[in-house]
Amino acid sequence: MRHLLLVVLAVFAACASDPNRGANRLEVRTGADQTGTVARALQQPISVRLLRAEAPVAQARVTFTVAMGSGAVEQADVVTDAEGVASAGTWTLGTGAGLQSILVTADEAVPLTFSATATADVGINVAAFEGDNQEAPRATAVPIAPAKRITDTHGNPVAGLGVEWQVIEGGGSITGPTTVVTDSNGVSRVQGWVLGPSAGQNRLVARMPGLPQTTFVATATTVGMPSLTIEAGDQQSAPVTINVPVAPAVRVRDAQGQPVAGVMVTFTVASGGGTVTGSPAATDASGIARVGAWRLGSAAGAHTLTASAAGYGEVTFRASGLATGAPMLNRTVLLSGLAVPWDLTFAPDGTLVFSERGGNIRVLRPGATTSTVLHRPMDVSASGQSGMMGLALDPDFARTRHLFAYFSARVNPTTVDNRIVRFRVNEGWDGVTDRQDLLVGISWGNGGAHSGGRLRFGPDGLLYLTTGDTRSASVPQDPNALGSKVLRIRKDGTIPAGNMSAPFRAPIWAFGFRNPQGLTFRPGTGEPFLCEHGPGTDDEVTKLTAGGNGGWDPKNPANPNDGAYWGYMGTSMTDTTKFPMALRPAFRDGNSGGMSGCDFLVGAQWRDWAGAIAVASLGDRNVRVMQLSPDGLSTTGMITTLFGGMERIRAVVQGPDGALYLATDGRPGGDQIWRVTAQ
């Protein structure tokens, strides 16, 4: 009996001397009740202290388990230190917005829960949620009020964003406020859309600075109603006090859609001054009435002309009055029915080669009226804003037949990168051979956001590429990332002298850019100029120099360790406070119309515009023409806007014939390539 008592006492003493026995309380040390962005690391680490009778317990195992939200911690199983502290390190939230939690357990302790609120990322996924492609009788409302949804890259709705709605074609109107804030489902819905007074296409856009514009299309029908529609001569440009190139014309139809002859149509100058001759004009056997001439007024800018007929409604023609000394322009549609053409270039024999973002490389042979597919790589991956992008032909193409392409490629089922690939084009333009992947592993991310993409040969015979930040906070200033850079390689993929030195990777020639989609070289000097797509502000045209820093750094200014992308939070695209030596833009657009491609205008046919740079705009749906100063560091004041409000323009390239070739982006009914001649 005495022996048994001694054993019990010994066991009791052993238990009392073991600090891990009876540990019964976990307390929060750091990281409670945080708020962060989905799929991003929280600012504070997650740590606890394990106590027994208010004394720290060392060398005890603590387990951190994600209970809600599918995120992850750096360390799931941790042993407490001498102070009883165990840290899971960084908690990266899952991709779903809302409440997320971690369960912390330790031997003989009551479990502890950490909670965090995950907010949606800044939305870049924009879609016409409801109300696109409708029909309604002219001058009446469409059945479904259009709505636009904005989500982040993980599908979480983004609430509280103000979306501006505007009618851009058809002359209709919207009811209710023109700015509608997204609701808890990320949806902005206009109250109603009343179509214009004439039959034909109507368009309504929903836009927010820094995000892709969404276009809604509706058709105004004439079932049981006569109509008057534009036949020719809309959206022209001409120097002031000069006749527009194409005399405006309308077509009149009866309620059954048949042309009506003998209807008197009155053409009236509505704005801009100027004169019209040949009004009123009677419709011919085809129902067409054409004005004699429309001479623009003396003021540069917007000019409008209305055409009306009793019982048939009214339509409006628009024209841009250009300053004296500007060329006369004539725009024709070269190709239609395309799927987001991204870039284009010309072979020595006049063949037009162009990319479609979905993956095709197409060609239009001289004299042909339709294009054919030259090649579609099996591994091309088109998602978000990425896919088949920049193209360039070898300056010695007649001998080598080398075509260079920049596209997003699926490396394996879970990995995509951007890369430069070289092909050899068959003599008959019916395919390619000898694929060589020259530069791979270029940054891709966030569903294909911000990949940049313009590919051009410089006067030094080297191949230059613009790459984007992929909506990553760290990429622009990271010397190891190939995103947010201007890269430069030889035609065989090797690295030339003169690129940046360590710690920068060998292909990098300049760095610190957001989403540069335009690159061109100034005739005569060979100086490179970058056209950069801004974050709701700061679209920029910038003269580049080797080793230059564009000044883009979309990190949280209050916490550089925060992994969230602050690129839409008023971040300056050229931060000269943080980077005093950053490259200064020659032109900055404070409204960010969404710059894309650009090219210089060469030839006497451009008159006072010769030597100017033409810059495409996506959101603003136009082309800007501007003269740069001799040193390339400013503009001379001449900035002209062409084709205002017509279509999103992605590519601007001057062809070997001296004409300007433009590619539309996301045009309802199929994209187009335009040919614009000057005289």
Image (spheres, grey):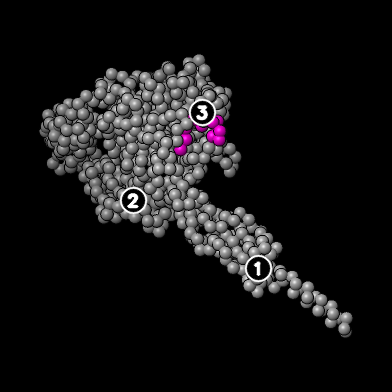
**In front: 155, or 91?**
91
Task: Give x and y (percent) for residue 424.
Answer: 53, 22
Q: Looking at this view, is 5 or 638 the one in front?
A: 5
Tag 2–tag 1 contact (CB < 8 Å)? no
Mark with earlier residue (2, 1) = 1
Gap in angstroms between the C-alphas marked 2 and 1 = 54 Å
Give me the residue at 45% from left, 35% from top: 549
Q: Residues within 10 Å of mark 1 (few under 14, many from 20)?
A: some
Residue at 47% across / 31% down in the picture?
Answer: 547
In this rendering, does residue 619 appear at all? no
Residue at which label 3 appears: 499
**Highlighted magenta segment, given as a residue range:** 501-512
The label on residue 163 is 2
Kindly state the secondary structure of the residue where label 2 is placed. strand
Q: CA distance from mark 1 to mark 3?
A: 56 Å
Label 3: how many Cα within 10 Å (few below 14, some 14–19, many 20+): some
